[in-house]
Amino acid sequence: MARLIVIIPLVLLLAWKVLSWWAKAKSARVEKLRGEVRHRTEERRAELERELSTKHGLVPREELVVVRTPEVPGLDAALAAATAGDWRPAADLLAAAAGDHDLRTRLVGPLGENAAEDDAWLKAWRTERPDDPDAAVVTVEALVQLAWNIRSSRQASEVSQEQFQAFHRVLGEAEQAAKEAERLAAADDPLPFYVQQPIAMGLGWENARYVALWAELTARDPLHVGGHLRALQYWCAKWHGSHELMHAFADAAVAGAPVGSLMTLVKLQAWDEQFRGVEDRRAAYGAPEVLASVEAAEADLAAAEADLAAAEADPAAAEAMAPRIRGLHGWLAQFHTRAGRGAEAMPHFRALGPYVPGPWTSYGDPVHVIQLDRVTAAAQLAGATD
């Protein structure tokens, strides 16, 4: 019995050491296997990245250019002048675009964003030309952008009470400024109503009031793409609508627009909004109803590109169409990739050239995300041809 008392602890100690050694050895083997898998994965990824240029004709990663501001001649210079305190180039740019609703919409956003950071140049413009309708509408957009900067893009649960109070206060100022913008604007100008859409969203306008605002905007420009994209956010489930209302709006927008208008982008963004956070993205983006929307967008894009080719004799028209066409190429590339359709995605990636437009510009590192998508599409294509 005395021997057993001595031996049993020794046996248990030995068994524990053996088990510990075995566990460490197994862990080391598992880690080694994981390392080998990671190495093979990295090698395959590097190979696919090389093939993006050599095999698929895509621009190398280091040559990609993120498109954060609209591609409008003179805009960068106007923004630089505004930052330096000179409002005249911005005023001249907007005045020269009179009657071109799409161009003016693409201008007012960056100008408002600039003024939200430092509005000294805008105040100087308002002082010198108090009845300038363009200055009035940029004022509204600047207040809207300032309000959303205060709120931040975080979820409501992560926004402080102080931020919400300041957000609503500044939006209230924007709402008052919008009344003056409406009063000063030309009768056919949709911009004073376009810039109010985020106000309606942030202040929680009831649906009936928003519909009245929408009627004013579309009475002036029924195919206002920027307005449709902002309206989509109002009608989505996280704001003042639902998936059903959002899709009903998108379907009506597509049905009411001619093929070649690129309005199918609204429907793609509706699906993308619905699928935020979905676990099985391939199943979601590959669903028959989604692929039907994608095919409609393909036809829309083909018609727009035919129009672009026909507009080559009109450089201004071609210049206006090109960025929107590029944007739809981007959305289609991502939709095809997420549906596991690398062969269909690759032509759209090629059409982008060196540019990185939406949807990737909404990410913190657009180049990294588009490169992931390009490599994924290449892998899908390789798997389909193996």
Image (cartoon, grey):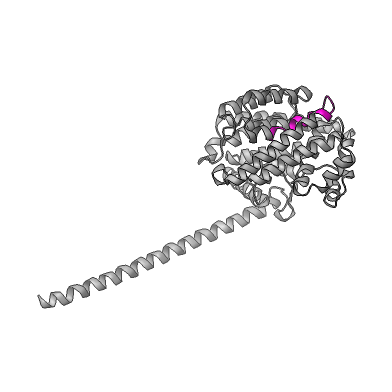
Q: Is residue 20 magenta?
A: no
Relative depth, front residue between 383 and 230: 230
Horizontal and vertical percent for residue 178? 76, 32
Count up the numbered dots.
Answer: 0
Query: Seen in the image, is 194 located left or right of residue 209?
Result: right
Q: Is residue 194 magenta?
A: yes
**Residues in magenta, as a range:** 183-198
**Which residue occupies 69% across, 23% down?**
212
Relative depth, front residue between 137 and 22: 137
Horizontal and vertical percent for residue 284? 54, 36
**Which residue occupies 83% across, 24% down?**
187
Query: Seen in the image, is 43 located left or right of residue 314?
Result: left
**Which residue occupies 67% across, 42% down?**
359
Horizontal and vertical percent for residue 206? 62, 26
In the rendered image, the vertical position of residue 323 relative to residue 77, given as above or below: above
Task: Name which quarter of the figure residue 298 lies in.
Answer: top right
In the rendered image, the vertical position of residue 308 relative to residue 351, given as above or below: above
**Which residue occupies 85% across, 40% down?**
126
Q: Is residue 134 visible?
A: yes
Q: Is residue 229 visible?
A: no
Horizontal and vertical percent for residue 379? 59, 48
Task: Name which quarter of the figure residue 319 lies in.
Answer: top right
Query: Seen in the image, is 213 located left or right of residue 156?
Result: right
Q: Quadrant of the N terminus?
A: bottom left
In the rendered image, the vertical position of residue 155 relative to residue 224, given as above or below: below
